[in-house]
Amino acid sequence: MYMTDCSTTFDIRRTTEADRTCIARLNFLTDVFGDESKTPLRGL
C-alpha cells in the first residue's frame, strides 16, 4: 500500500469584513438550529 505525505501548511492572515460576516452567520445558524450531530428527538 502506498502512503502519501499528508503534511499541510497554514497561513495566518487578518480577518476581513466578509470573514466576520460569514462567521456571524454561522454562529446565528448554530444558535437557531443547534447541534446537527445529535440524533433528532422522536416526533420531530
Image (cartoon, rainbow, N blue to C red):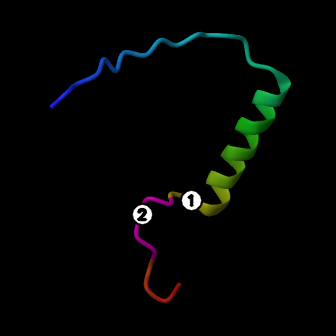
- Residue 17 spot, x, y in % from top left: 84, 25
Q: Which mark is residue 19?
A: none
- Residue 15 spot, x, y in % from top left: 74, 18
Q: Is residue 13 above or below residue 20?
A: above
Front-lying residue, 1 or 28: 1
- Residue 7 spot, x, y in % from top left: 36, 15
* Circle 2/circle 1 CB separation < 8 Å: yes
What stretch of residues is rendered in magenta?
A: 36-40
Q: Residue at x 68, y 45 (%)?
A: 26
Q: Residue at x 68, y 10 (%)?
A: 13
Residue placed under numbered mark 1 in the picture: 34
Q: Is residue 24 left or right of residue 35?
A: right
Q: Residue at x 61, y 10 (%)?
A: 12
Q: Residue at x 72, y 12 (%)?
A: 14
- Residue 22 spot, x, y in % from top left: 75, 38
Q: Quadrant of the N terminus?
A: top left
Q: Give the number of callouts.
A: 2
Q: Mark 2: which amino acid?
A: Lys
Label 1 SS: loop
Q: Is residue 19 magenta?
A: no
Q: Magenta-highlighted stretch: main secondary structure?
A: loop
Residue placed under numbered mark 2 in the picture: 38
Q: Is residue 15 left or right of residue 7?
A: right
Quadrant assignment, res 24: top right
Q: Is residue 37 magenta?
A: yes
Crowd around label 2: few <14 · some 14–19 · many ≥20 (10 Å): few
Q: Is residue 10 left or right of residue 32?
A: left
Task: Tell me the distance, in whole angstroms, between the alpha carbons under discs 2 and 1.
Answer: 9 Å
